[in-house]
Image: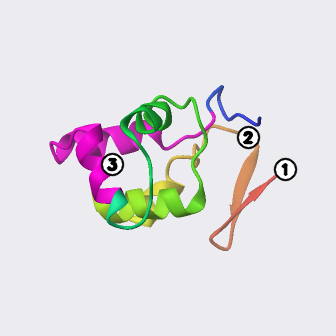
Amino acid sequence: MKKFNNNRNIIGSLIKKYREEKHYTKTDLSHKLELLGIELDRFELYKIETGKTSVKDFELIGLCIVLDIDFDKLKNLVIDYDTPWYFLYQGVLLFY
């Protein structure tokens, strides 16, 4: 499985931060996601938050909806201007 900085996802710490700011337990978050038709139990959420598993696109969208995470904040997770492996061209992130 592909990894970025030795993690299977880069949003886990952001998910945990927003979950804790809302004072949700992993079980609370799991129940709220279930209302959207997304089944992630607390152990799966733990694996996401610790970067041990990847996140499907629909799971990411559900997490952003439930935790009120602006999609624009997600792009800031990979934009590190000291890293030479990408550049921005007319607002598009290009990798090389």
Calculate the distance from the C-alpha at mark 3 to the C-alpha at mark 2: 37 Å
Does residue 79 sit above or below 73 in this rendering?
above
Does residue 4 sit above or below 61 in this rendering?
above
Q: Report the span colored magenta.
A: 8-33
Residue at the extreme top of the image, as rendered: 6
Identity, as a three-letter code, of the amino acid under mark 2: Pro
Characterize the magenta stretch by its predominant secondary structure. helix
User: How many labels were placed on the picture?
Assistant: 3
Where residue 61 sits: x, y (%)? 47, 64
N-terminal of the pair, mark 3 or mark 1, is 3
Residue at the extreme left of the image, as rendered: 23
Q: Quadrant of the N terminus?
A: top right
Indicate which disc residue 84 carries.
2
Mark 1, residue position: 96
Question: Is label 3 in a helix, a strand or a loop?
Answer: helix
Closest to the observer: 80 or 45? 45
The local crowd at label 3, few if under 14, some if 14 to 19, many if 20 or more residues have their Cα within 10 Å, is many
Does residue 21 sit above or below 38 in this rendering?
above
The local crowd at label 2, few if under 14, some if 14 to 19, many if 20 or more residues have their Cα within 10 Å, is few
Indicate which disc residue 30 carries.
3
Identity, as a three-letter code, of the amino acid under mark 1: Tyr
